[in-house]
Amino acid sequence: MTSGRIISRLLLFVFFFPVTVGCTPTADIYRYTFPGTTMGTTFSVTVVGEFMSDQVKAELEVSIKDRLDKLDAMMSTYKPDSEVSRFNDWESSDWFGVSPDTAKVFQHAREVSEMTGGAFDVTVAPLVDVWGFGPVGPLRTLPSDSEINRLLGAVDFRQIEVNDVSTALRKTRIHVKTDVSAVAKGYAVDRVADLLDARSYDSYLIEIGGEVRTQGHREGGQSWRIGIEQPTESLGLLHRVVQLSDAALATSGDYRNYFELDGVRYSHTIDPRTGRPVTHELAAVSVIDVLCVRADALATALEVLGPDEAYDLAEELGLAVLLIIREEDGSYRELFTPSFLSRTVDPAG
């Protein structure tokens, strides 16, 4: 590990402040919140600005939900008719036409895979399934070493090619399967931001399944603030706050999505290089970036790498990152890059 780390011993996790439902005016500034469900999780879009008529609110709500529904229909591995599912079933090395959105998601995924030496890899899908974390459902017995090694032969992000011009994908090995769940929510956040930008809204907070992007300010002109909680299975214990304006934040952790078998805990985070759930002490990672799609993928990649490699890579790439590391005695310590620490503020402020 390199020098210059900022470390404190705190029990924390990154979360977001719940936003007010409905319309809340402050002087001539109003807050409107549009909640719902998408991609197997919840979303909340908050817009701050001038008064909206009921018609404008209704139209915006429909536009947001329509955009999210279309993205889910393209990228879900749980829907057999989605573009990703049909591409997975495509047993050919010919080009497979997809929407521009799906092509962009695969392109973003490829870039993060290259940045992280394959720690992020959308072709990990067969391993996600065999460990019981995919559409196939929970496993009954642990996969054998021979089965894992066989599936590893089809895991390599370089086996997927993307044509940005014709918006098409191609497999260089026809049995490759993909899973974009670790990047799709972040991309959906960015696409909702595009929608709001196109309609000239300049202050908003978008959250999908804990992935967040902000623009402008909340009421009163202050920056948006994102809460940091303890990394436990229960919610509600706020400890630290991150100030976030014109940026996105995504998190990845191992403390909620896991299973135990014969006294051993297995994380849903699968290392595409080994084919097995991660076993290191890194409990959670948060990344701040301009794009939520990139923050989303990077958080997953850094969670795979573990604390030492993750911090070194974050420092090398100049990323704003918080690592939460589990100690043997059950406590936690934090490891920040300076650019992340500079965004933290007093929760009472």
Image (spheres, rainbow, N blue to C red):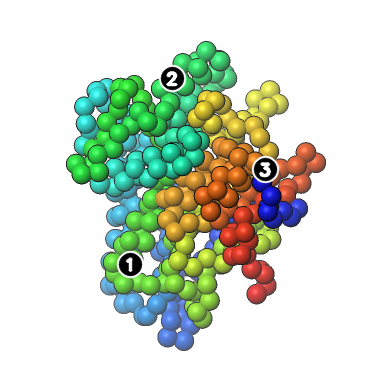
Q: Give left or right: position of 1 versus 218.
A: right
Which quadrant would residue 99 be assigned to in this image? top left
Q: Residues within 10 Å of mark 1 (few under 14, many from 20)?
A: some
Q: What's the distance in space between the residues labelled 3 and 2, CA to CA?
A: 31 Å
Q: Amino acid at mark 3?
A: Met
Q: Nearer the viewer, mark 3 or mark 1?
A: 3
Q: CA distance from mark 3 to mark 1?
A: 41 Å
- Specify the quadrant of the image occupied by residue 94: top left
Sort mark 2 into few (<14), some (14-19) or many (20+) by Cα contacts within 10 Å.
few
Badge 2 marks a residue whose secondary structure is loop
Q: Which residue is mark 1?
A: 197
Amino acid beneath label 1: Asp
Q: Earlier in the sequence, mark 3 or mark 2?
A: 3
The residue at 68%/27% (across/down) is 264
Position in image of residue 119 (x %, y %):
50, 36
Q: Quadrant of residue 18?
A: bottom right
Q: Are marks 3 and 2 in contact (CB under 8 Å)?
A: no
Q: Is residue 265 left or right of residue 288?
A: right
Q: Amino acid at mark 2?
A: Gly
The C terminus is located in which quarter? bottom right
Q: Which residue is mark 3?
A: 1
Residue 143, position as x, y percentages in the image: 54, 18
Q: For mark 3, does the 10 Å Cα neighbourhood hold few (<14), some (14 to 19), or many (20 or more) residues?
A: few
Which is closer to the viewer, label 3 or label 2?
A: 3
Q: How far apart, in angstroms, are the residues tagged by discs 1 and 2?
A: 43 Å
Q: Which residue is mark 2?
A: 153
Question: Which quarter shows the N terminus?
Answer: top right
